[in-house]
Image: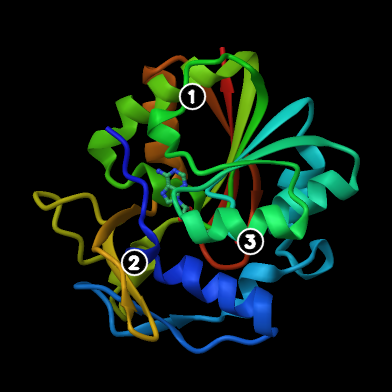
Amino acid sequence: MSNLLTPQNDPMGRAIADFFEKGKAAKLRVFSSQFDEDEIPVKHLFRTFGQMAPLEQKALLLAKGKILDCGAGSGCHSLALQDMGKEVNAIDISPLSVEVMEKRGVKNVSNTDLFSHPAVQAYDTVLMLMNGSGIIGKVENMGKFFTKMKQILKPGGVVYMDSSDLKYLFEDEDGSYQIDLNGNYYGEVDFRMQYKQVKGNTFDWLYIDFQTLSLYASQYGFKAEMVEEGEHYDYLAALTLL
Ligand code: SAH
């Protein structure tokens, strides 16, 4: 099953294309059943290496060999990697983002859904950045995700993924947490985006704490390591295929 977007339901891709063509963009609006309306600054999607968060810079520096930039967006990470002389393939489900990446000079780009990526066992490194765990969607997809990673990584290959532990959203003033342990995992979120008149479909996006990620990793034959912690419950993990 492939979940590629069409240009008609690709609001982020439209925003990226607008910013690329005009140097500015309108509001990229984000809706969720769990949160108030928010906005993604489109310019942020075009950040240079120097403008990236330390966690992202770290991931780019650690990436080696043949690299897959998964959910590459405007291609910011792929372009930085190419500048370092590294070999990278970029994939994204957004056809408009893929077009922009081609125009910006990303050498190997394809409009591919990670979950339909052929089982090539070709990559030394897979990068999933800007809350890259989001692409997994829900905890129940963890098996599907690690199985796909096994199919595309070389033995010993590493996934660098950033995420955040959302538990701070449920913290009371007294420091206790209001989390319904019988409910869905607290980092499972739904989003929908809109750019001008272009409305996207609702999609699932997973934020995951490091401990839960580690448990799943070990269950599926990966070793999880904390590479670096950010300033606000965010972190970069390395998942090594054993
Ligand atoms: N990595 C970029 C973009 C992050 S936004 C950056 O840091 O700026 C997340 C991107 O992942 C979007 O461009 C979205 O289209 C893409 N994406 C979502 N699900 C995907 C999937 N299953 N396979 C490939 N790309 C996906």
**Quadrant (top left, top right, bottom left, bottom right) of the C terminus:** top right
* Residue in the picture at 24% in, 63% down: 202
Dot 2 beta carbon under 8 Å from ligand 1: no
Measured as percent of width and height from the top left, residue 184 is found at 16, 51
- From this view, report whether residue 85 is shown above or below residue 162: above
Left or right of residue 172: residue 29: right
Left or right of residue 75: residue 50: right
Helix, strand or loop status at disc 3: helix
- Indicate the quadrant where residue 161 lies: top right
Residue marked by disc 3: 100
Measured as percent of width and height from the top left, residue 213 is found at 42, 37
Q: Nearer the viewer, residue 192 or 55?
A: 192
- From this view, report whether residue 129 is shown above or below residue 166: above
Packing grade of label 1 (10 A; few <14, some 14-19, many >=20) is: many
Nearest to the eye among marks 3 and 1: give it: 3
Q: Amino acid at mark 1?
A: Met
Q: Amino acid at mark 3?
A: Val
* Residue in the picture at 44% in, 48% down: 93
* C-alpha span from label 2 to label 3: 16 Å
* Residue in the picture at 51% in, 48% down: 92
Would residue 41 be visible to someone looking at this image?
yes
Packing grade of label 3 (10 A; few <14, some 14-19, many >=20) is: many
Residue marked by disc 1: 149
Q: Earlier in the sequence, mark 3 or mark 1?
A: 3
Helix, strand or loop status at disc 1: helix
**Quadrant (top left, top right, bottom left, bottom right) of the N terminus:** top left
Q: Amino acid at mark 2?
A: Gln
Q: Nearer the viewer, residue 118 or 224?
A: 118
- Indicate the quadrant where residue 103 lies: bottom right
**Mark number for residue 8?**
2
* C-alpha span from label 3 to label 1: 26 Å
Nearest to the eye among marks 2 and 1: give it: 2
